[in-house]
């Protein structure tokens, strides 16, 4: 199944004028879904289905204190009363919440490894194969010539989450020196309960929405970041989520706290094996940004999207929200959404502090039978708050791609400013592109501008590329990359490279 | 569950006070509409389609009384236009005030009098309204189809000699009026329909317009100044190939106005323009809801909505362009803008695109903000006092919508109305 042994890739015709590097690059990213393989590893499951017993079991497995269990149980009670939301423009068969595993961990993780050296080599191998080095001396793969950038290679600390558990977190010692706490959330609940207690559920309340409530009840692991006042996090932090087990939902919970005047850049990546049965992923990410702090959160979402006929794939129901609590706080969401069969995701900013800023850059690509309903919410509460939304949606095959967003200017958000640009590109006449923005302006000193366009790949641009010897797919990929440029530029370099390649793969087979 | 029950009882309470006209060609359509409105229930606050406008006063059994307005400082609208006048007072036809209904190129009848069993309007009455109930339900329109006692049936067979003007007078503080108009424009035929006046304390109006290939329908409407009136209006139009539909609405005041316009472009090369200018002061709430479906090749649609709001007035815009599979070469444009003249006013917008064809150019834009201080400073530095300078900039802001009116004389009338309003409402 892996792309590298895809027989088709070897027969690629090399055209004149195309250098070997390009051919290799295309071969490298070729194939249907690069991360569709699975790791054969002995797993330990909680019984199928959802009940208070399962919630207790998850809490117990994570060796959680009593207050955490109470919190989960309360969330579970709330969830039972909630109805699944139906307003998104996505259509999928009824999810049987009792036909899922809510907890799965590799047997070898039963006793928590004290360091990465003790981690099951099979797991390390998995991440190596995904291009995520869990060895500290290595820099993140995919960045050629990174060494030349400076005296020291760029370091990226990684928290690797495999199904329901965190496998390990790199560079913990070095981060500790700077005062930064970066660990799995289960570890944080034990080691830093005061911080978790203070912040968990304060941005995304337990009963916020159906999936967030479900997550609050059954979240298994995820990452925790605390950056103390005035600290600029010395390296990029990253979490890599991998769903491996079959019929298992992944419910990760991420909590990021940037205290006064601090800065952190956080990257998130995700993949899953290719399976016929759809799998559920319902995550919650909460970010707290205090006075003068800045958080950059970048995601490359590449869950298995299902096959051309819409079989399998991940149902991705995610709640992500940042709360700019202090004045001049700043948050930036950047997302490249290429995977998942169904995406339901609206990373949002609550701009509470005066002069705080929120930005949202998004590329959402839906091909074949994929359905994406994604966007953002910018809630302006403080004075002179600013937000900017740049969303690029691309639909191909029979996919449906929807931008859904809210810009709200509260009466007290004097002199607020918002600029929204959402563009959609359609490739082929079987797909759909939709825009559903909500604009609520409740004072007159704010300025709100919203623009949206929908168009197809420009024929003149395609013709130009083809006349230079590119085949149609390459030409489309180039035009699409140009279309996405504004967003790609906002990504950290490691992700920009990956994202550019992803744009090309995701559209494969969409032309002609 | 409780919500559904509440909705049902509210609907029952409203229906209990209404009487359905009996007999004639429209009876089947009325019964069908009653069944539909009973099934869907009247709108309530939690309905997504009523997110920004509270429907309760439009739905409740009795209308909220609305004080009559002294119109002595304003000349009747469209007086400079040669037109055929049809007058309704609180929803009741006024034969005295109306002209003879004969007009070259057009046959006009009243709904209440068209009692023959076979009538051309039977193929349209409630039919376009029913089509327009998908994908979004519009229960107030179905209610109208079931119960509207009167309206006009206009069959345009050639080029209408002059515009048909419907004047809606408001004379009773507690009137609750319902009118249902059906207009059929034959191939190559052309008509201009004018509407003006506050109509009633509460007004529910439906206009169904069927435009055959190459037909043209022009519509200019001014909703009255009576500040306490409430209105829910619907236009349902079906456009044939190479046909033209152009509608402009001026709304000045009114405590609650919801204007829905539902257009379906079913023939190739059709053109549809919908525009609106509204000026509101105080507890004014104005909602433009537009739904345009492109279901043919090479059609053009244009929505231009401008709102000037002050002293806590609220402007709402919900606009959607739906491009069906195969509706290639669609050109869809939509702009909604608001000018907020003070701190308390608000603008709520939901401009939507839903597109299933790839060779299209669709765009929407929406902006909201205060008056441009620099432009104001420029005018003042040229000796224009602040009041007139603000008016001038406001009129310039509204111009893009007003310019959608093709006829110059009509445009001048509307502009004069706007200037008068601005002058009266200067702070």
Image (spheres, rainbow, N blue to C red):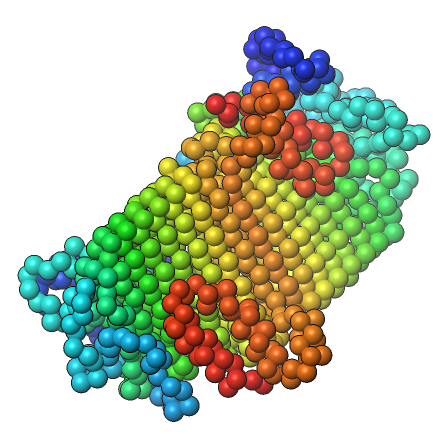
Judged from this view, the residue extending furthest toward the left is: B117
In the rendered image, the vertical position of residue B104 relative to residue B127, given as above or below: below
On the image, the x and y values in percent for residue B197 come to 33, 79
> Is A380 situated left or right of B303 in this image?
right
Q: Residue at x 23, y 65 (%)?
A: B160
Q: Quadrant of residue B426?
A: bottom right
Seen from the viewer's position, the closer of residues A22 and A415 is A22
Q: Residue at x 7, y 59 (%)?
A: B118
In the rendered image, the vertical position of residue A311 relative to residue B18, given as above or below: above
Q: Residue at x 63, y 29 (%)?
A: A478
Q: Quadrant of residue B171?
A: bottom left
Q: Is residue B52 visible?
A: no
> Is B385 situated left or right of A325 in this image?
left
On the image, the x and y values in percent for residue B381 come to 71, 79
On the image, the x and y values in percent for residue A494 come to 75, 31
> Is A350 situated left or right of A312 in this image?
right
Q: Residue at x 76, y 47 (%)?
A: A295
On the image, the x and y values in percent for residue B393 come to 59, 73
Q: Quadrant of residue A38?
A: top right
Seen from the viewer's position, the closer of residues A79 and B77 is B77
Q: Is residue A360 visible?
A: yes
In the rendered image, the vertical position of residue B10 relative to residue A47, given as above or below: below
> Is A182 situated left or right of B403 in this image?
right
Quadrant including the N terminus of chain A: top right
Tag count: 0
């Amino acid at each position: 199944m892996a792309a590298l042994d895809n027989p088709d890739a070897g027969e690629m015709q090399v055209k004149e004028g195309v250098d070997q590097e390009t051919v290799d690059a295309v071969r490298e990213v070729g194939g249907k879904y690069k991360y569709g393989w699975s790791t054969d590893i002995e797993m330990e499951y909680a019984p199928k289905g959802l009940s208070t017993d399962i919630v207790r079991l998850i809490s117990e497995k994570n060796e959680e204190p009593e207050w955490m269990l109470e919190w989960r149980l309360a969330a579970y009670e709330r969830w039972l009363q909630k109805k699944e939301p139906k307003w998104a423009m996505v259509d999928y068969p009824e999810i049987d919440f009792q036909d899922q595993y809510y907890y799965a961990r590799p047997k070898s993780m039963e006793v928590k490894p004290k360091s990465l050296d003790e981690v099951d080599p099979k797991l390390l191998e998995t991440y190596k194969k995904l291009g995520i080095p869990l060895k500290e001396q290595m820099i993140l793969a995919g960045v050629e010539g990174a060494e030349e950038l400076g005296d020291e290679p760029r370091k990226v600390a990684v928290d690797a989450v495999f199904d329901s558990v965190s496998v390990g977190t790199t560079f913990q010692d070095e981060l500790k020196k700077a005062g930064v706490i970066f660990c799995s959330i289960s570890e944080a609940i034990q080691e830093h309960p005061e911080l978790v207690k203070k912040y968990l559920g304060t941005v995304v309340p337990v009963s916020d929405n159906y999936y967030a409530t479900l997550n609050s009840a059954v979240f298994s692991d995820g990452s925790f970041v605390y950056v103390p006042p005035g600290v600029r996090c010395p390296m990029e932090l990253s979490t890599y989520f991998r769903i491996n087990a079959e019929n298992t939902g992944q419910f990760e919970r991420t909590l990021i706290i940037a205290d006064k005047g601090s800065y952190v850049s956080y990257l998130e990546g995700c993949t899953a094996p290719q399976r016929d049965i759809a799998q559920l992923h319902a995550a919650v990410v909460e970010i707290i940004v205090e006075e003068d702090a800045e958080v950059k959160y970048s995601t490359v979402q590449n869950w298995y999207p299902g096959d051309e006929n819409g079989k399998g794939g991940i149902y991705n129901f995610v709640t992500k929200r940042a709360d700019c609590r202090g004045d001049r706080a700043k948050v930036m969401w950047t997302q490249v959404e290429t995977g998942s069969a169904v995406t339901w995701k609206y990373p949002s900013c609550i701009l509470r502090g005066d002069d705080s800023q929120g930005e949202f850059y998004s590329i959402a690509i839906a091909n074949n039978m994929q359905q994406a309903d994604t966007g953002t919410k910018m809630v302006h509460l403080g004075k002179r708050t600013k937000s900017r939304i740049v969303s690029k949606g691309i639909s191909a095959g029979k996919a449906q791609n929807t931008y859904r967003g809210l810009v709200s200017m509260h009466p007290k958000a004097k002199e607020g400013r918002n600029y929204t640009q959402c563009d959609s590109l359609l490739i082929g006449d079987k797909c759909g592109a939709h825009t559903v923005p909500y604009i609520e302006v409740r004072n007159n000193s704010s300025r709100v501008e919203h623009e949206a366009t929908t168009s197809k790949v420009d024929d003149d641009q395609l013709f130009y590329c083809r006349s230079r010897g590119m085949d149609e797919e390459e030409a489309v990929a180039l035009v699409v990359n140009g279309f996405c440029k504004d967003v790609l530029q906002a990504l950290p370099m490691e992700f920009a490279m990956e994202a550019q390649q992803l744009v090309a793969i995701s559209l494969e087979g969409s032309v002609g | 569950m409780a919500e559904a029950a509440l909705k049902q009882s509210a609907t029952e309470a409203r229906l209990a006070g209404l009487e359905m006209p009996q007999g004639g060609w429209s009876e089947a359509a009325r019964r069908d509409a009653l069944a539909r409105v009973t099934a869907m229930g009247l709108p309530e606050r939690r309905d997504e389609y009523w997110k920004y406008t509270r429907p309760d006063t439009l739905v409740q059994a009795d209308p909220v009384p609305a004080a009559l307005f002294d119109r002595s400082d304003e000349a009747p609208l469209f007086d400079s236009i040669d037109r055929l006048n049809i007058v309704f007072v609180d929803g009741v036809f006024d034969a005295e005030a109306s002209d003879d209904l004969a007009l070259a190129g057009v046959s006009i009848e009243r709904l209440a009098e068209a009692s023959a069993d076979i009538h051309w309007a039977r193929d349209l009455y409630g039919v376009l309204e029913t089509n327009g109930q998908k994908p979004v339900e519009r229960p107030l329109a179905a209610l109208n189809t079931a119960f509207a006692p009167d309206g006009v049936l206009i069959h345009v067979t050639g080029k209408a000699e002059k515009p048909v003007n419907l004047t809606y007078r408001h004379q009773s503080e507690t009137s609750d009026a319902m009118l249902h108009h059906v207009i059929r424009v034959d191939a190559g035929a052309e008509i201009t329909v004018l509407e003006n006046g506050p109509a009633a304390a509460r007004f529910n109006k439906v206009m169904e317009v069927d435009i055959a290939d190459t037909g043209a329908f022009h519509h200019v409407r001014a909703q009255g100044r009576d500040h306490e009136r409430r209105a829910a209006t619907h236009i349902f139009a079906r456009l044939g190939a190479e046909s033209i539909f152009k509608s402009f609405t001026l709304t000045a005041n009114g405590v609650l106005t919801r204007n829905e316009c539902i257009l379906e472009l079913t023939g190739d090369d059709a053109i549809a323009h919908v525009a609106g200018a509204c000026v509101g002061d105080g507890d004014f709430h104005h909602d433009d809801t537009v739904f345009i479906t492109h279901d043919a090749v090479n059609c053009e649609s244009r929505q231009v909505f401008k709102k000037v709001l002050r002293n806590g007035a609220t402007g709402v815009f919900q606009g959607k362009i739906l491009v069906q599979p195969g509706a290639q070469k669609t050109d869809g444009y939509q702009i909604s803008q608001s000018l907020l003249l003070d701190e308390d006013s608000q603008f709520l917008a939901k401009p939507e695109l839903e597109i299933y064809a790839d060779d299209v150019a669709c765009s929407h834009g929406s902006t909201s903000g205060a008056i441009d201080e620099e432009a104001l400073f420029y005018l003042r530095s040229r000796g224009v006092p602040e009041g007139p300078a603000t008016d001038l900039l406001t009129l310039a802001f509204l111009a893009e919508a007003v310019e959608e009116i093709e006829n110059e004389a009509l445009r001048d009338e509307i502009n004069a109305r706007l200037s008068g309003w601005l002058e009266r409402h200067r702070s």
